[in-house]
Amino acid sequence: MPEPKPESFQAIRGALKFYQIASIITGVMLLLLVTEMVLKYTPIHLELFAGGSGGFLWFAPVVEGVHGGLESTGNGLNLSMGILVAHGWFYVVYLFACFRVWSLMRWPFLRFIMLALGGVVPFLSFFMETRVAREVKAYLSRREADADQTSSTTPATEGAR
């Protein structure tokens, strides 16, 4: 596999920071989504609402609809639906962040798939974020140290010819 060029190291640092932020946000949103799905689709059958007849923040029961699906009985702002939509959009941003780090680091495609799974497997984004950050920072440090050693061992008299 080709290695990243030294000119791209600054871009890699920026992409890594963006990936770390997107990873944390996506991981938190995924945990909220899983909690929302457990509340809605297990025998608990509740959805979270803001405002409406239940007050500032409240749970409304979800009942079997006439056509066989689940229907909400709450009024106000459906936060359960908001969590679902927000996670979907943050996942798109997360995929972009994964793609950016992956392409700048010139990793194999399977690595991109592993990064992408971080947004759909609970807790995986937190582990991947820690591992990727540690790995990329170590790689950049090693490459920069090698470049410094190479430049310090090159004779300065080459320009005097």
Image (spheres, helix red, strand yellow):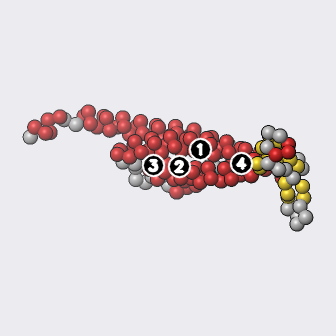
Disc with the residue nearer the chain's start (1 vs 2): 1
Q: Residues within 10 Å of mark 4 (few under 14, many from 20)?
A: some
Q: Is residue 140 visible?
A: yes
Q: Is residue 117 visible?
A: no
Residue 158 lies in quadrant? top left
Location of mark 4 (residue): 83
Q: CA distance from mark 3 to mark 1?
A: 17 Å
Q: Could you tell me if the residues under marks 1 and 4 are in contact, i.e. CB atoms within 8 Å?
A: no
Disc with the residue nearer the chain's start (3 vs 1): 1
Q: CA distance from mark 1 to mark 4?
A: 16 Å
The type of residue carrying mark 1 is: Ser
The image position of residue 143, as x and y in percent, is 38, 40
The type of residue carrying mark 2 is: Ala
Numbered badge on residue 105 = 3
Q: Residue furthest left?
A: 161
Q: Residues within 10 Å of mark 1 (few under 14, many from 20)?
A: many
